């Protein structure tokens, strides 16, 4: 059986990390707090950070955080 709730995150230092969806949500939340004044266009009209996080998870695979670099993520299927 496969599960889609595991993600690989590639931070700017390129040391990949495996995270769960809640961990990815928290990571993106923390990153978005710091860039609210410089959001990507597709997030500008989304009012809350939790909604922005869900939009990113559903529609994107990277986030440019300016000085903090570009963060990337993708879902992986682990055989359990």
Image: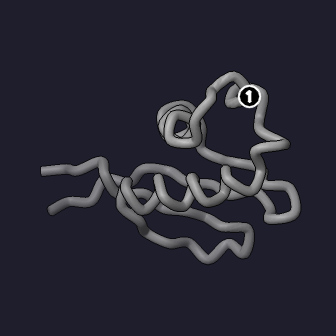
Badge 1: residue crowd in 10 Å (few <14, some 14–19, many ≥20)? few
Left or right: 79 with respect to 11?
Answer: left
- In the picture as drawn, the residue positioned furthest to the top comes out as 45
| Residue toward you, 59 or 30 | 30
Left or right: 37 with respect to 51?
Answer: right
Left or right: 29 with respect to 7?
Answer: right
Tell me, what colour scheme is on the image?
A: one colour
Q: Residue 48, located in which quarter of the rendered image?
A: top right
Spot occupied by residue 80 in the image (x, y as percentages of width and height): 15, 62
Spot occupied by residue 56 in the image (x, y as percentages of width and height): 57, 38
| Residue toward you, 27 or 58 | 27
| Residue toward you, 50 or 3 | 50
Asked if 65 appears above or below 55 in the picture, the reply is: below
Check disc 1 and report the residue beneath it.
Answer: 44
Asked if 38 appears above or below 30 in the picture, the reply is: above
- In the picture as drawn, the residue positioned furthest to the right comes out as 67
Look at 48% across and 33% down and name the residue there: 58
Q: Residue 23, located in which quarter of the rendered image?
A: bottom left
Q: How many marks?
A: 1
Left or right: 12 with respect to 26?
Answer: right
Helix, strand, or loop for circle 1? loop
Spot occupied by residue 31 in the image (x, y as percentages of width and height): 66, 57
Spot occupied by residue 30 in the image (x, y as percentages of width and height): 61, 60
Look at 73% across and 68% down and name the residue there: 12
């Amino acid at each position: 059986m496969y599960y889609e709730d595991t993600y690989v995150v590639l931070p700017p230092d390129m040391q990949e990390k495996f995270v769960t969806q809640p961990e990815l949500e928290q990571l993106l939340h923390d990153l978005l707090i710091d860039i609210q004044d410089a959001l990507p266009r597709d997030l500008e009209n989304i009012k809350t950070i939790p909604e922005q996080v869900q939009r990113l998870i559903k529609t994107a695979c990277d986030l440019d955080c300016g000085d903090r670099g570009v963060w990337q993520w993708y879902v992986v299927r682990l055989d359990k």
